[in-house]
Image (cartoon, helix red, strand yellow):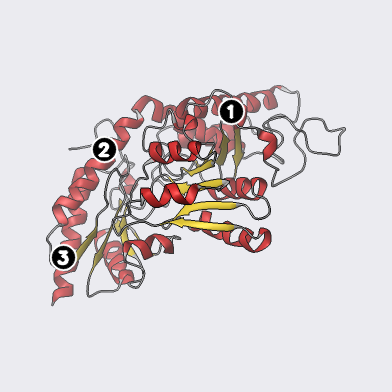
Amino acid sequence: MQNQNISKPTHLNNFIYLDNAATTFPKAPGVKEAVSGFLENIGASAGRSGHSLSIKSGRILYQTRKALASLIGLKDCKRILFTLNATMAINTLLQGFLKERDIVVVTQMEHNAIKRPLNALKERLNLEVREIPCSSMHAVDLKSAESMLKGAKLLACAHINNVSGAMIPLEYLSTLAKAHNVAFLLDGAQSVGCVEMNEVMSQVDFLALSAHKGLLSPMGVGALIVADNFAIERIEPLVFGGTGSLSEAEIQPEFLPDRFESGTPNMHGIAGLQAGLEWIKNKGVKNIHKHELLLREQLISGLSGIPNIKIYNTQGQSGGTLSLDVRNHTLSKVAEILDREFGVCVRVGLHCSPSSHKSLGSFERGGTIRLSPGIFNTSAEIESTMDALRNIATRCAQ
């Protein structure tokens, strides 16, 4: 099961990169060239001037919005609001939408990108935050979900868990949220570009994403995306300032995307995102998801039953990420051996998501060893990684 038609840069041949849940690497072919091409040949700020270079920059900005809108099933690309990352997108929505004594529903396995801003707002706005229970296999308790949504203003949860790879039942939760007139924020940091989402904006009201993960693009670009039918005036901007429009006015423009996009955008990063989106379109998101799932299944099959190795499997649909433990050894020591002796790059610990580990049962251990294959990994690399883990597990047993 080799990943055909993709060549890995030769300088990476000594490494097996399995930390794609943190940031994908390498990036899509064409991304580096798009970034350097912008910096070398355009360089101008979009929407700030009338000269030809600024117009070219503005065209890249518009074309990238259109390409991203097409990927997620959004009609009005002006509702794509560029940010620095998914965390800023989530903060923009939470701080701009929630009011005094609102009720917010989350799951028991949310990332700190949702938990920390909610905890800060809980103190400031006297919010009530309800947590839907999850099983040790990261399955959402659907009966509890329905009861908790009654009277709530917002449901906020990750599409794919960054620790276990578990995927929430999006269609079911979307139906529940609509039935209870609850707005739905989906954290798509781990899913956009990795799983098919061409109808997602008909299922949720808000989508947060980062370009540097599944979209195989540069760091420093994210987006908050607002559904076509959601009243934008219900959200207050997080940042105010210059937009290149209505400069005679000393108040923020009301129209999109300027209402939420103050300051100069990261145009070389957005140029890279445009290239990443084009590559993903040609490759096909379904093909990407299929490949990552095959590598995940290879890991599960090859490591199940190995003494001293515990796999934290999930229930239901998933992305490509998998967590495990090599017992009788510290997590950091396993990561060190994998890196120094075998050239395998993984992440260990709590992964900015202690809630996920509490429900998974790995919190007291200090977390897990997370393997997150990507589209550029091969079956041979997974086999080498499993050989390394088997070797370490044997040492631990001695």
The C terminus appears in which quarter of the rendering?
A: bottom left
Residue at the bottom extreme, as displayed: 398
Quadrant of residue 262 within the rendered picture:
top right
Whole-number angstrom distance, CA of label 3 to CA of label 1: 55 Å
172 vs 295, left or right, is: right
Residue 247 lies, in percent from the top left, at 83, 33
Q: Secondary structure at mark 2?
A: helix
Q: Measured from the top left, where is residue 387 in percent x and y?
A: 16, 58
Marks 3 and 1, the one that precedes in the sequence: 1
Residue 254, position in %: x, y?
A: 75, 32
Task: Write the residue at 50% across / 35% down.
Answer: 273
**Residue count near mark 3 (Cα–Cα under 10 Å), binned few <14, some 14–19, many ≥20:** few
Whether residue 215 is visible: no
Residue identifier under label 3: 391
Amino acid at dot 2: His
In this view, the residue in front, 148 or 246, is: 148
In this image, 335 relative to 280: left or right?
Answer: left
Label 1 belongs to which residue? 229
The percent coordinates of residue 175 (x first, y second) are 44, 36
Is 349 on the left-hand or right-hand side of 292? right
Q: Which residue is mark 2?
A: 291
> Can you see residue 365?
yes
**Vertical side of 109 occupied by 171: above or below:** above
Mark 1 surroundings within 10 Å by alpha-carbon count, few (fewer than 14), some (14 through 19), many (20 or more): few
Give the amino acid at mark 1.
Asn
Q: Quadrant of the N terminus?
A: top left
- Most foreground residue, 53 or 331: 331
Q: Earlier in the sequence, mark 1 or mark 2?
A: 1
Q: Is residue 62 above or below residue 352?
A: above
Tell me, yes or no, whether the two marked residues, 3 and 1, touch with CB atoms within 8 Å.
no
